[in-house]
Amino acid sequence: VTFAAEASAKARCTKPELRLRLSCKPRVMVGNQHIVQVEIANPGSGDATGVMLLESLPEGVSHEAGAALEFEVGTLKAGETRQLDLILTAEQAGLIDNVMTARADANLQTTASCQFEVIAPALALTVEGPKRKYLERPATFVVNIDNPGTASAKEVQLVAQLPKGLQYVDANHMGEYDQATHSVYWSLAELPASERGSVQLTALPISPGEHTIRAATKALQGLEDRAERSLQV
């Protein structure tokens, strides 16, 4: 009597993987929304389960859900790729390093980042002119507007208010004198970053004493600044 027997078992080993990539435009104006494109992929041979995206927002940007973000992706099948958009709001000027982490079961983890710059305009106002003048001798003042920011300032408005002891004579660059407010007004459509705009104002001292010219400027996005210059007559 002869006996023979055979038995076999097969096991297929799979290995899930995670790959994360972030991309975005290099610049965004302060106050605007910025889209970070997120690509999460599983280039492995098995399904990745319990996939999560996590991020702690850097300073300078915000999200409606808060500073600590979590997003549940779920299961990524082998070879599957998903694309998502992370919408951030630019809050303050500076270089932003946006870092995101992807995690999954079986201790899978990977990190990716993208950098972009939040640009913003700024205004800095100064008034130059003589400190002393004789009565009824014309005094010329120069009002300077600087933009030390990283973006153009739009719709810049400038006003210089004269004291009662100074009489308006003239102004350049289409400055308009308003007798009711005893002030001169200028308008500038745009002031590029790191540029300076200057206007000139001439007034006639009509009474002795110390008189102060007060200047103010404002632009879009709530930009404003003030400066003054005193004259001893």
Image (tube, helix red, strand yellow):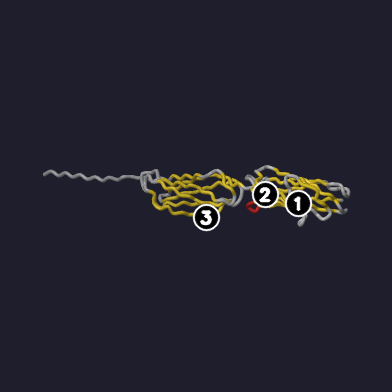
Q: What amino acid is at disc 3? A: Ala
Q: Are marks 2 and 3 in contact (CB under 8 Å)?
A: no
Residue 214 is left or right of residue 99, and the answer is right
In this view, the residue in front, 123 or 158, is: 158
Q: Position of residue 59 (x, y in %)?
A: 58, 51
Classify mark 1: helix, strand or loop: strand
- Label 2 or label 1, whichever comes before in sequence order: 2
* Label 3: element kind: strand
Left or right? Give the position of 185 relative to 95: right
Residue 226 at least partly seen:
no
| Dot 2 or dot 3, earlier in sequence | 3
Relative to residue 135, is residue 27 drawn left or right?
A: left
Which is nearer the N-term, disc 1 or disc 3?
3
Measure the C-alpha gap from mark 1 to mark 3.
53 Å
Q: Residue at x 71, y 44 (%)?
A: 197
Q: Which residue is painted at 64% across and 51% down in the image? A: 220
Label 3: how many residues lie within 10 Å, few (<14), some (14-19) or many (20+)? few
**Which x, y percent locates residue 6?**
20, 44
Q: CA distance from mark 2 to mark 1?
A: 17 Å
User: Relative to 6, is 64 above or below?
Assistant: below
Q: Which residue is mark 3?
A: 68
Reading the image, the residue beneath label 1 is 177
Query: Which residue is nearer to you in this view: 179 or 49?
Result: 179
Alpha carbons under labels 2 and 3: distance apart: 38 Å
Q: Are marks 1 and 3 in contact (CB under 8 Å)?
A: no
- Name the image quarter holding the N terminus: top left
Residue in the foreground of this view, choosing between 53 and 208: 208
Residue 156 has which mark?
A: 2
